[in-house]
Image: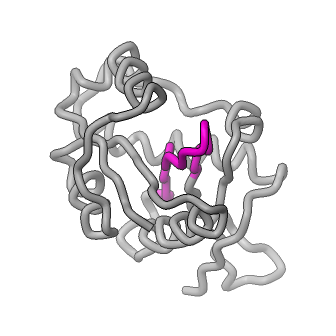
């Protein structure tokens, strides 16, 4: 399986929204969630400051298939991994790890020294996975990071388990 990581283009926008929706189904099932926040609308993701990288299955060069993406926000000189999603049918093949590695490299290339994220502590493909990618638990120490905690509270994410901030040093 040949995976190519590349910058997202406008033709990928609707795909990233659908991939997030499909990947979120794993959490919804795990938590038995009755309600769940919708995926980030494609136009919002494309318009936000930062970058989106997609993972493309390139076995068929004539018709490559986007199977995952990573979205990193860049706000006030800070890089924050906002979303990582891989189609469940392509899970556990290292695609998420490739996307995280590429996102960290791109953030470094853009001059960042750290990347933060927020995730569920007890979900195996969340905090334990990110820990294996070099992220360590940290505290929200900027206004933006503290605001993200409030956003998560308003979305009801804490109803499904403890969440944590993690930081990777580049």
**As drawn, 34 above or below 2:** above
Could you tell me what secondary structure mostly forms the magenta stretch?
A: strand
Name which quarter of the figure residue 103 lies in: bottom right
Q: Is residue 94 left or right of residue 131?
A: right
| Quadrant, the N terminus | bottom right
Residue positioned most to the top = 154
The foreground one among 149 and 88 is 149
Residue shown at 83%/49% (left/top)?
10
Does residue 113 show up magenta in the picture?
no
Q: Is residue 152 left or right of residue 30?
A: right
Residue shown at 45%/57% (left/top)?
114
Residue 18 percent location from the top left of the image: 61, 43
Residue 19 percent location from the top left of the image: 57, 49
Residue shown at 63%/41% (left/top)?
17
Residue shown at 64%/48% (left/top)?
16
Does residue 86 show up magenta in the picture?
yes
Residue 123 percent location from the top left of the image: 21, 48
Q: Is residue 48 left or right of residue 100?
A: right
Residue 20 percent location from the top left of the image: 53, 44
**As drawn, 44 above or below 156:** below
Name which quarter of the figure residue 125 lies in: bottom left
Total numbered circles: 0
The foreground one among 167 and 64 is 167
| Range drawn in magenta | 71-87
Colour scheme: one colour
Name which quarter of the figure residue 96 lies in: bottom left
| Quadrant, the C terminus | bottom left
């Amino acid at each position: 399986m040949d995976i190519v990581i590349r910058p997202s283009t406008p033709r990928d926008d609707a795909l990233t929204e659908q991939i997030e929706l499909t990947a979120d189904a794993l959490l919804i099932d795990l938590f038995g969630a009755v309600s769940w926040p919708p995926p980030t609308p494609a136009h919002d993701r494309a318009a936000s400051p930062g970058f989106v990288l997609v993972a493309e299955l390139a076995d068929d060069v004539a018709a490559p298939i986007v199977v995952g993406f990573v979205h990193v926000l860049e706000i006030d000189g800070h890089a924050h991994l906002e979303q990582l999603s891989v189609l469940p049918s392509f899970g556990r093949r290292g695609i998420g790890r490739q996307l995280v590695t590429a996102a960290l490299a791109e953030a470094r290339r853009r001059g960042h020294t750290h990347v933060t994220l927020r995730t569920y502590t007890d979900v195996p493909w969340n905090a334990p996975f990110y820990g294996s990618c070099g992220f360590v638990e940290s505290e929200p120490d900027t206004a933006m990071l503290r605001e993200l905690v409030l956003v998560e509270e308003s979305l009801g994410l804490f109803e499904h388990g403890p969440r944590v901030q993690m930081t990777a040093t580049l």
